[in-house]
Amino acid sequence: QFHTIKYEDLKWDESLGQGSFTRIFKGEKTDYRDGEKHTTEVLLKELDPDHKNCWESFFEAASFMSQISHKHLLHVYGVSVHGDKNIMVQEFVKHGALDLYLKREKSLSVSWKLNVAKQLACVLNFLEEQSIIHGNICAKNLLLVREEDPSQGISPFIKLSDPGINVAMLGKDVIMHRIPWIAPESLAAPDNLTHECDKWSFGATVWEIFNNGNPPLQALNSKEKFYENKQQLPPSQWTELADLIGQCMSYDLAFRPSCRSIIRQLNSLVTSGNNVIFRLAQDDH
Ligand SMILES: N#Cc1ccc(Nc2nc(N)cc(-n3ccc(CO)n3)n2)cc1
């Protein structure tokens, strides 16, 4: 399954906030390898004691991350159990969750956004090839390992975090908060997720990335009707982008594109994006 880490080999530093049913802290883990003491900076994700009953699902998420490795998948070192504390020990990702980063950095370029969307499409394709369903794709579960540095030609690098507590374990109210990321068909049957669900969530996440982290659907009441009325998120002015998001977020599973098609369409957005900028630049002169 996964590596168990001794509680006494962990050290807690500052709190970094909380996810649903979890709290996250910066920390350190100590290993003793070939007679030497190594300390590694880690992210400690604690399951709230009052959600102890979700510990299997919590550790299932951890083992999900440990059983496969990919450059865009968060590395999980292991888990630690101490009394009523259940802790997942993750690699510490320097710039944290993407939803907060998007809100903070207001002037991210189109190429930055496309680059990040392509990385997510690649890891989605990998998971599909491994017949693994994530089930909770959203900007909050994307972590920014490296910021871009255009002067050095350095592009951003993201990793997909663990899916957290399985959506089937969550109450109706928590599931409602996952609208519009959760696929409509999963609302009715949260315990039978499919790869198509991840594609729907991918569409909602790309929408987030291009809307600077502004949460889609502010008011809760509109969330109720959103799926009943088969509504779509407000389309981007960039029609090719709006088309891709619309395909991923189609209510008919069969219409959702394959990962290969998603990657192909993103690649053509990159070129059409450049052409638009080139054309605009030409118009200026
Ligand atoms: N200020 C600040 C700051 C906060 C966090 C990190 N690092 C980090 N590393 C991880 N492995 C996971 C996370 N997460 C954050 C939300 C979630 C939800 O799942 N995870 N954050 C770095 C800087």
Image: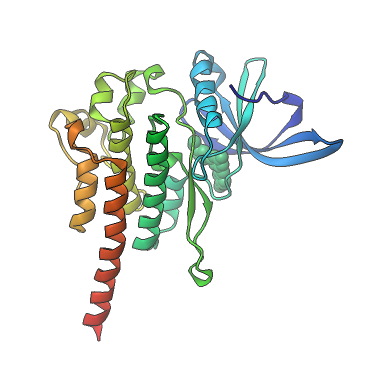
Residue 247 appears in the figure: yes
Q: Quadrant of ligand 1?
A: top right
Whole-percent x, y for residue 253 in the image = 20, 31
Is the residue 68 above or below the residue 1 in the image? below
Q: Is residue 229 left or right of residue 8?
A: left
| The quarter of the displayed image where residue 249 is located | top left
- Where residue 91 sits, quadrant-wise, is top right
Q: Measuring from the top left, give residue 155's x and y in whole percent.
A: 48, 61
Q: Is 105 placed left or right of 15 in the picture?
A: left
Q: Is residue 5 above or below residue 33?
A: above
| Depicted 244 relative to depicted 229: above or below | below
Along the line of sight, which residue is nearer the eye, 138 or 248? Answer: 248
Q: x, y (%) of residue 47?
A: 55, 23
Q: Residue at x 51, y 64 (%)?
A: 154
For image coordinates 40% across by 59% down, the residue present is 112
Residue that extends furthest to the bottom in the rendered view of this protein: 285
Which residue is located at x 36 percent, y 24 percent? 174
Q: Quadrant of the N terminus?
A: top right
Q: Is residue 226 left or right of residue 189?
A: left
Instruction: Say which quadrant the C terminus sits in.
Output: bottom left
Picture quadrant of residue 82: top right
207 or 35, nearer to the observer: 35
Q: Residue furthest right?
A: 35
Colour scheme shown: rainbow
Instruction: Say above or below: 38 vs 238.
Output: above
Spot occupied by residue 17 in the image (x, y as percentages of width and height): 54, 37
